[in-house]
Amino acid sequence: DAQMNAPHPGTNFPAGYHPQYPPAAFQGPPGHTGYPGLQAAYPGMLAGYPVPQADYSVPPPGCSSAGPVGFPVQHQPVYNQPVGPAGVPWMPAPPPPSDCPPGLEYLSQIDQILIHQQVELLEVLIGFETNNKYEIKNSLGQRIYFAVEDTDCCTRNCCGANRPFTMRILDLMGREVITLERPLRCTSCCCPCCLQEIEIYAPPGVPVGYVIQNWHPCLPKLTIQNERREDVLKIIGPCLVCGCCADVDFEIKSLDEENVVGKISKQWTGFVREAFTDADNFGIQFPLDLDVKMKAVMLGACFLIDFMFFESTGAKEQRAGVW
């Protein structure tokens, strides 16, 4: 009793005052094991969770403190949000296979890619050409990448669909994992030299392949090459690429053009969209066990095909049946 009644520093309170929390300097008498647990009618308690007092300091965002013992751990918000339009889930990143460039691990477990070009309101209203933007998804509709064209205003509106461009392909963290470079080339089918070409880099600055146009009087023909410029596959399109109310397929074949291993399809999106916009949808199919570098090169081939055959004003009017 003498010890309990002895004065302690910081405990000289007015009569009738009962602090909610003991002073930090108060250590308790010898043998003291702690303070009694919270009662059901303890002030500030509601449904088992504490209500912060007026002077209670709120931890800053990102604080990983678990809080008092016995209280549930509250999950902090995640601030590294994906880029691109909201509302579409991103594909979870699979474990990267060996010798896989960073960012291409998403392509290792899929055999189909869907590419959806976004409609630009400025192009629809006044015909002003803006940088193209694309959502790249898997067959489940989960977003894999987001592609953004990077060209200046003068190049876009003076050269039109024949313009050289840089296409930057970003992952869910906004990192550029693939870069496509299309140089300025001749567009006449009567000229067998200086034909269309696109270069694929993954990561940026490291070439993984090329797609070059082969001269043919009637058929669209392209060759897929690896980083050493060795021919790997062929792409052959139909004689007429302006089919109305139907998909347009570009077959991916072996070098001898005997076996079909996949295809790049321009998907029909309806009369209104085809007639008044140049926003196109594409699908790419390839073998599941194909090298991820070649899958990235096929992605570049799809963008080259879009600009060569489906980006111009005359091409979209032919597809819609206006001509």
Image: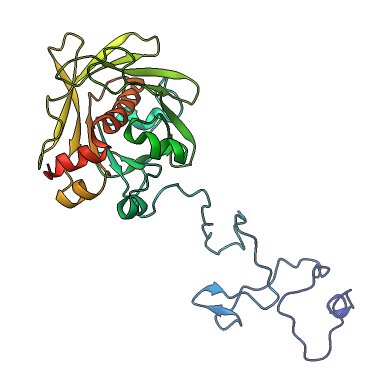
Instruction: Kindly give the residue lying farthest to the bottom in the view shown.
Output: 16
In depth, the one of 76 and 311 nearer the eye is 311
- The residue depicted at 11 percent of the width and 36 percent of the height is 243
- Color style of the picture: rainbow
Residue 59, percent from left and from top? 65, 62
The spot of residue 78 in percent (x, y) is 51, 52
Which quadrant of the figure contains the N terminus?
Answer: bottom right
- Quadrant of res 221: top left
Give me the residue at 79% from left, 72% from top.
23
Question: In this orientation, does residue 302 appear?
Answer: yes
In the rendered image of this protein, does residue 189 appear above or below residue 37?
above
Establish if 263 lies above or below 43.
above
- Give the side of residue 113 with respect to residue 251, left or right: right
Asked if residue 82 is positioned above or below residue 66 in the image, the reply reads above
How far from the left and from the top, in percent, is residue 273?
A: 21, 50
Location of residue 96 in the rendering, given as x and y in whole percent from the top left corner: 41, 27
Residue 170 visible in this rendered orientation of the protein: no
Q: 108 or 245: which is nearer to us?
A: 245
The residue shown at (27%, 37%) is: 312
Q: How many marks?
A: 0
Which is more toward the observer, 291 or 30? 291
